[in-house]
Amino acid sequence: MKTVRIGAGAGFGGDRIDPAVALARDGALDYLVFECLAERTIALAQLARVADPSEGYDKLLERRIRAVLPDCLRNGTRIVTNMGAANPWAAAQKVAETAADMGLTGVKVAAVLGDDVLGHVAPYPLDDTGMPAEALGTRLVSANAYIGSAGIVDALQAGAQVVICGRAADPALFLGPLAHEFGWASDDWERLGRGTLVGHLLECAAQITGGYFADPGLKDVPDLANVGYPLAEVGEDGNAVITKLPGTGGQVTLATCTEQLLYEIHDPARYLQPDVVADFSNVDFTEIGPDRVAVSGGAGHPRPETLKVSVGSRDGWIGQGEISYAGPGAVARGRLAADILKERLLPFQNAIAAYRSDLIGVDSILPGDSDAPPPREVRLRCAARCDSREVAETVADEVETLYLCGPAGGGGVTRSLREVIGIRSTFMPRSEVEVSVRIVES
Amino acid sequence: MKLHEIAHGRTGDKGTTSNISVIAYHAKDWPLIEAHVTAERVAAIFDRHVTVTRYVLPKLHALNFVVEGALEGGVTRSVALDAHGKSLGFAVLEMELPA
């Protein structure tokens, strides 16, 4: 029976590269998939593209490709990624150029296009306000539809060795190769559901091999420093075994698989994807060997009629500052500093859309009160979102002035300012989204 | 006894919604977790008004809580330190259960 070996080479844009190199070299993979695109990333990439039409793809694209391409070509491993971000065609050209520069000629690189729907999004209502996207006016910067696996399948059928997408749904990066290899029909909901399950389990890379998992004493993970990335051995029926390379750190167990199964899932019976409504409600995991977990029981239902669209807009600025207090009375001095800040910012209250100050170590992360004893040191953090860059900077300035004009012993001020790209969602009929493939050869 | 001693979990986000899984380490603890870790108790952890839906996965001895309204302003516009609410699952694991 045919088995497809598919691995994950990144679970987010900043992810480690070495474990991907190990998979490319030793994984005997058919496919290596890099998932690098978050909601906000694509809006930022869109701004970069507006500033320079040859930009707007992942900053680490060239580094990642240089690191794995020779091994992938040697081992017959094809690469699929969403590192195209806001500009998959420029990214494909960059990959071809990089390959040529490494002396690797004749490499076919495909860009999957069509997720950029900025030109059509105007009339569609946004999830939070119900207002049409056009109400964002000049603040609107991006609109990208979550497209499915069809463009990836087309690219692979055309012989691409590297497939570069923009805003494809994360699991579709894995479902595409599987549907291509096994010839799954676009209405074979059960297999599409299972392929989506494999994609969902792998798309966050180390999150299924012991990353984001360790809790000393309760969940100890061996050699987390050298955590390996996962691969799946997938059969024609869509059932799979999740594993990792021998000799790498981390672990693949029922517990790591169950945590990842439910990660960022709402109703497990209805995981909405562009290709299928995947059903994870009857999934079963079985440990069949060390770091080997068999996955079965995935299912699927007919795909949604509409595609989710991520809409990015300029949403002002966040100014932020932090200062530490330590030793006896640390919490009281931190609270006094917070009160002083609040008073000094009163003149700007109408220009501040959202404001928050917390004591890190006391109340910055978890909701509710605690009866825990006061910590030895605290860090006041204050952040404000404002339409105006100047007001946001003033907030950070006022944290810094707590050095001389605040309570005793404040130290270690840091400050930052960033532009806010807000992301909202809408839904669009499939007919508005036309996917195509364009190929370049090194 | 804290839930943390008998269960683990992971937290994810989409927009202003947080999803928090609670998974039993051992089958013997699953009935206790299923009975006591309710949507109401999870909702009570939050300072703000949230709507909590609980999904039960009996084969996996797991619960999945979908907490709408947990993340103020959504991840992209939030002024919170942990804008994704990645740590919220550990607030659930602080829950006291009958020993």
Image: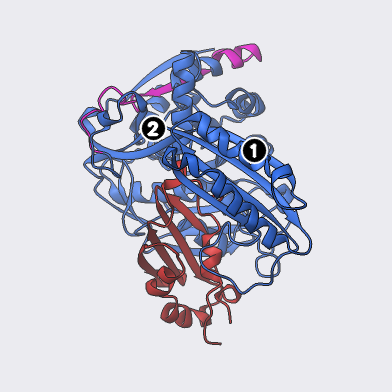
Q: Name the magenta segment's main secondary structure.
A: loop
Which SS class for mark 2? strand
Q: Residue B64 colored magenta?
A: no
Relative to the observer, which residue lies in front, B19 or A395? Answer: A395
A368 horizontally vs A192: left or right: right
Reading the image, the residue beneath label 2 is A312
Q: Which chain is red?
A: B
Q: Are marks 2 and 1 on the same chain?
A: yes
The residue that appears at 73% across and 43% down in the rendered structure is A403
Q: Would you place residue B1 above or below residue B59 in this image?
A: below
In magenta, the rendered stretch is A96-125
Q: Would you place residue A176 above or below residue A114 in this image?
A: below
Q: Position of residue A63 (x, y in %)?
A: 64, 25
Instruction: Specify the amino acid type for callout 1.
Output: Arg
B38 horizontally vs B2: left or right: left
Relative to the observer, which residue lies in front, A433 or A72? Answer: A433
Residue at far bottom of view: B99
The residue that appears at 62% across and 15% down in the rendered structure is A104
The residue that appears at 44% across and 33% down in the rendered structure is A316
Reading the image, the residue beneath label 1 is A415
Relative to the observer, which residue lies in front, A318 or A269? Answer: A318
Badge 2 or badge 1: first in the primary sequence: 2
Q: Position of residue A406 (x, y in %)?
A: 69, 48
